Image (cartoon, coloured by chain):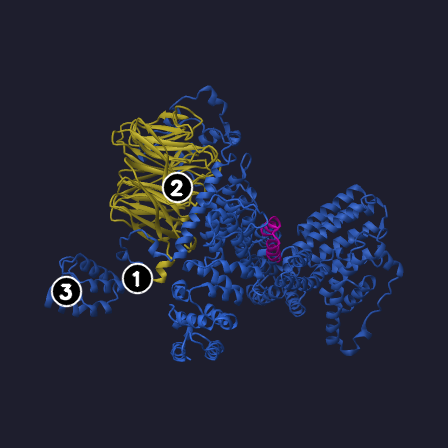
Chain colours: A yellow, B blue
Amino acid sequence: MSAAGLERPQVVVHAQQSLNYTVFDCKWVPRSARLLCLGSAPRGTGVLQLYELRGGRLLLLSEIEKAKPIKCATFGAASLQQRHLATGDFAGSLSIWNLEAPEIPVYSVKGHKEIINSIDGVGGLGIGEGAPEIVTGSRDGTVKVWDPRQKETPVANMEPAQGESKRDCWTVAFGNAYNQEERVVCAGYDNGDIKLFDLRTMSLRWETNIKNGVCSVEFDRKDVNMNKLVATSLEGKFHVFDMRTQHPTKGFASVSEKAHKSTIWQVRHLPQNRDVFMTSGGAGSLHLWKYEYPAQRSKKDSEGAEMGVAGSVSLLQNVTLSTQPISSLDWSPDKKGLCVCGAFDQTVRVLIVTKLNKV
Amino acid sequence: MGDESIMYSLDQGTTKTYQIPIGHLDYKFIEKCTDVQHLEKILRVLRSGEEGCYPDLTLFCEKRIEHLAPGSRVLRKDKPAATAADFTAEEWETINGELMSWVAEMNEDDNKPEFLKTGTLHEGQDNLPPIRCSSSCLPAFQNEKFQNKQRNKKNIPRDYSEWDKFDVEKECSKIDESSEENNSKARFVSRPPPPLIEKQVNTTGMTKKEKIFIATREKEKGNEAFASGDYVEAVTYYARSISILPTAAAYNNKAQAEIKLQDWDSALQDCEKVLDMEPSNVKEIVLPVRGEAALGKAEMGNAQRKFHSKGGGSKLEDRGTQKQKESTESGLKKGTEEKKSQKTDHEGEANGYLNSNQTSESPEAGQSSRSHGAGSLSAGAAHSTSLPPAAAKLKSEGNELFKSGQFGEAVPKYSEAIEYVISVGERSPDDLSILYSNRAACYLKGGNCSDCVQDCNRALELQPFSLKPLLRRAMAYESMERYRQAYVDYKTVLQIDSSIQAANDSVNRITKTLIDQDGSSWREKLPPIPVVPIAAQLNRWDGGNFTSEVKPKSPTDINKEEQLQMNREKGEEKFRTLKNEGNDFVKKGKYDEAVNKYSECLKLNTKDCTIYTNRALCYLKLHKYEEAKQDCDHVLQIEDCNIKAFYRRALAYKGLQIYQASVDDLKKVLLIDPNVLEAKKELEEITQLLSLGGVAVADCQQKQRKKITIQEVTDEQEEGQLETAEDVVADNLSSKEAVQKCVPSRTCEKLTISEPSNAYDFGQIVNAVNASKDQSACADLLTITDPKKLPVLLSNKLEGEIFLIFIQSLAHYILGKDPGLVYQHLFYLSKAERFKVVLALLSKNEKEQVQRLFDLLTENQNHQYSLEELDSLKKVYEL
């Protein structure tokens, strides 16, 4: 291997565990070396497993079975002390679980008519100012924001008007939560629509279409004045939007990159460095990227309006781990470079990405 | 390509995809082609195999593309995840070790109740913002956005509890916004307001761990903002991080961001904070930043403040540029060209400043000003009876400001205090004098030399021959290049107290300058030096009636930074000698004395890590593990990756039988430097000990242990076996650490019993022997070792040093007793692996030693070997 090759980050499979169910999502439990895998068992029930990383292996600590398959989960709205898990399931229910006593949810609401595809939380874990809130995106076309302190009804509801065709919402993400008031939700739909809802003004701030179904969106950080947004698409492209400067007509500047030969299922930013992110592809591949800022992040157009200037992305590393899609990806918030991914070959893998300090 | 390609296409046709002429699939073409896109097409064709399979050509094409466009997408290949084979052993170990220690740490944290304490659960929620007002509905699709505007609010009526949380203003603003929006019909609602990020973070109800976590996060946000060039945001986030948990790193980063924003004052302040918090990392990190800040500040016209450098030459230069700058600045407001030329000047100057004063001035600035402030404070306290309370308060405020380096702000405080005292009419000359003197110090710090002189004059009028105002005036004069007056003042100071090193040095310096300036008759041009009345000198010592500016009894307490500095220089010399003495004692094995010396050193300088680590070593030798641990802890607080401290603390932990901690420390050692063999060995042992379940050893004095298999010992004797083995190791270790120290004779005795059974044991003993250069022990080892086994035991570990000590011990110890054995050893030694290599690397001197051994063998020839055999062996040894 060349010297340059050694300097690049390397992806190492530290531990892997095959599962007897389809894993949809996996998450690190904050402030711990434990992780959660959740998905759908063959007999159509939901499974939630808690593993602990120990001596290069994953040790099953507990397993919980629920009536409906669980699609997605987040710790984002939980306090660092409680670490309650919020999940969305196939039946459209949002539930919050105390993992110490997982029999009954601490909060549960039948929020959507159909499957909850995506969930995100903010305001917990010391991430983001303001109230703890959870956003869910569903096949029924609605995006709803929930506050765990308010039962039954969402605190905000973004839905198509009556008579409009409902688009399947595939992904949601919080952002811009840099103070108590500001907060946005970004949602991606199956027709390639990306919508940015401003929760402070309760308005649609921006929308665009990237032509293909939006599989995953994520802000580089939820708790800063929104900086960058990455959206991945069905046909293997991803778009990085510079969210600092919004042009009145052109919106946000973006750069796109064709990365994988197949759908990019997920994008996740490194919690310790917002300019590094990983995408997971349909052919079992992982790509690690770095965003480079342009010399000037904004410029004036002919009419004097500020418009953003997109930077560039460079590939830091790519690996292929499986032949099946890697459907979920999560960086450890506590250990830089530690990451877990779940693939449709019913395997969950703990990865170490080295040399992220030198990126 | 042009004609050529047409020609090719005529000849051979084209590929099916991309229509590339077949002729382009050729080494020569690819080598010359610079069109990356074309090459990429060629590569795709080659890879697809539609024109046949040419692995070499494909590779060649890839290389060519890589050469032209390293980032090209076609070069991306599916790669499997990296495995151990892709890393060096150390890297792999580091990667895994790091993760393991993190996992261990996490699990440990988890088990602590602190983090999951249910008691604190809801504390944090009290300060949560209210639930978002009203369930609002937002149309997800643009086209029906406006028609749905009314729907936004109606969805679910508020229930009563919600009305409690109703935020009128927010609702109003919402209405305003929506009406505005409707008017403008803008597609996006409102321009985002400039980000209002709070500079403070509410940390109530947070555990320490959480604070660290969040502070780190905020700092990372700052770093990212810095990286993207948003320095204002970066400063905000660093400030947030600091508000949660002040760290030197955050201050340092903040300073750098402030420099980018040209906020020199804040940058300097932050640098000072870093220096306060972490005086040890001064040189590497802070000074460049501080220098830059000072430089920038200098440009802003405050040069004097930070340029009270004491390096004679650079100082003159310094002042030259200052003058120049003052004139230019008063004249014109920074013409750009002017500024540029100044900048270069200052650059050189700042560098000089940094280089010449790094050790003496900079790290001390914070300290000296602090101690000065403290001194003044105590003065205030002592005389609070005579000073009216209001003035006393003002004065202490001033002192505080001075302490924190805000000299400019301190001045008005002192001025108010002075006015107050004068207006009250209560003439207490002592206090007034101190106030003037303190204000003078501020002026001096701020570079306002003429005001400083004035204040000093007033102070001296009130309190003639008081030390501080005199010194300050002298310094001010010196800064103003009024050397004669400065000389006189310094001389006066020396009459009062001749032990003030700063004054002595300054006098010497000024003498030189004056001689240069006025020639040999310089003394004639001096104003008369006043004769200090004996009373003042006495006062200086009994202090009670005198202003408390001068602390009686301990001249070192005189809070003149000059003084401190010079004392420091003097102290440094003493410190060095003490340290050397300590080191000598260590070499001689007199650890008690060494500890005393080191402790004295530490009285002089509490910041020197090496002293602590050295003292820790002594404590280890003296089996005072607790003290050793404390010393190491201290070092690690100052310098968090001091490898020696980690290693010695590991040994201390081992002595204290806290093996887990010991293992942790050793791991850290190996993380820092994976090549520390001792640490590796220790780690192995202690891990073994841990796995043994910590077989308790009765004798607490002998805590260091190591497992060396001793064949003669049976199970019943296990206890004894461990102990004997420990002795060996304890001593081996000590011998390793202090090489010159002679090895206690015990070692040899103990070593004799352990006949090595395998290469590893043998290697261990040889290493120990080699480290201590103990030939007798080596001889014993060789005596009990069967020569035939030598090549096996040595395995591939034969090195020059080992070879040499073998030769020496054979010559000095074994030859007299058993020349046959010597021959046998030499014979089998030559069969060992790496023998040739070692032989080839021997120096001339070393060869002579071998030659001598052979000569001796020849002399002592007996029946065990013949001369012919010896000769042939000599040839093997290339003699």
First along the sequence among labels 3 and 1:
3
Q: Which mark is residue B22?
A: 3
Chain letter of the residue beneath label 1 in the structure image: B
Chain letter of the residue beneath label 2 in the structure image: A
Left or right: where A345 falls relative to B805: left
Q: Secondary structure at mark 1?
A: loop
Q: Are marks 2 and 3 in contact (CB under 8 Å)?
A: no
Identify the residue at horizontal 56%, vertical 67% (top origin). B344
Residue range of the region highlighted in magenta in the rendering: B611-632
Q: Is B124 above or below relative to B196?
A: above
| Residue B247 can be seen, yes or no | yes
Overall secondary structure of the magenta section: helix
The reply to whether label 1 and label 2 mark residues of one chain is no
Front tag of 2 and 3: 2
- Residue B597 % position (x, y): 68, 59
Distance of label 3 from label 1 (alpha carbons): 23 Å
The residue at which mark 2 appears reads as A53
| Label 2 crowd (10 A; few <14 / some 14-19 / many >=20) | many
Q: Secondary structure at mark 3?
A: helix
Snapshot quadrant of residue B579: bottom right
Q: For the residue marked with disc 1, what is the amino acid?
A: Ala
The residue at which mark 1 appears reads as B69
Front tag of 1 and 2: 2
